[in-house]
Image: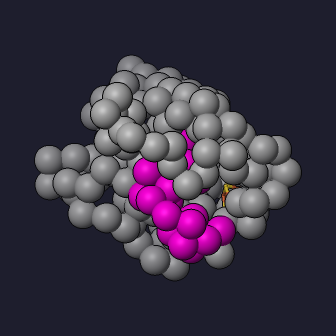
Amino acid sequence: MPKHDPSSENSDSYDSSSQDSEDRPSLPWYRAGLAFECTGCGNCCSGPQTGFVWVDQEEIESIAQKIGMQDDLDQFERKFVRDVGARRSLVEYSDGDCIFLDPKTRGCSVYEVRPKQCRTWPFWQSNLESPSKWGQAAKSCPGCNKGKLYTLEQIGRIQDHGTSPPTS
Ligand code: SF4
Ligand code: SF4
């Protein structure tokens, strides 16, 4: 499940740091770019598999502010955040859906301040390792290989800054 990063607490599925080495001798397989356009299906925010939506303190505070709980961060964290080893993840409903996935609209109720993990999907390093990994991502994300073509440079910027929307 894309949003639900199933990796261990030490994983870096959506971290781009390993991609930008100046020593890199050749361009990656997706040098011509990749097409992506979110359909808003909500798959990347939902169960049934459990996983993780990693959040850091800044992201926690932004979401808390968005829902008017900025003055009670302790309560916010008790309600919406869980510890996973040394890291923190958003809580899920029992069916595996992210706690911030609106059950009616299947959209993200904190879209403007969604965590970087969500903003960078599907351009996670783990999905870009090979065409087959990208193909695997596309199986659960109908937006992959559709619509707007993102250049290599744009993909790098999204990985670094999370400026690409999944619109869910
Ligand atoms: S990013 Fe993909 S899986 Fe997520 S809502 Fe958009 S199309 Fe669906
Ligand atoms: S925070 Fe929003 S975009 Fe991220 S997994 Fe939850 S519902 Fe989806």
Residue 51 in the image: above or below residue 31 = below
User: Residue 10's quadrant in the figure?
Assistant: bottom left
Residue 69 in sight from this viewpoint: no
Place residue 105 in its image quadrant. bottom right
Image location (x, y in percent) of residue 6: 37, 67
Residue 39 or 125: which is nearer the viewer? Answer: 125
Relative horizontal placement of residue 55, taking residue 97 as reference (left or right) = left
Q: Position of residue 141 (x, y in %)?
A: 67, 65
Residue at the front extreme? 25
Q: Residue at x 50, y 27 (%)?
A: 161
Q: Which residue appears at 36% of the width and 47% of the height?
A: 54
Q: Which residues are magenta?
A: 120-138
Magenta stretch, main secondary structure class? helix
Q: Residue placed at 49% from the left, 64% from the top? A: 130
Please state if 140 lies on the left or on the right of 167 as rendered.
left
Identify the residue at the far top of this view.
71
Is residue 93 visible from the viewing direction of this image? Answer: yes
| Pick the front one: 158 or 110 | 158
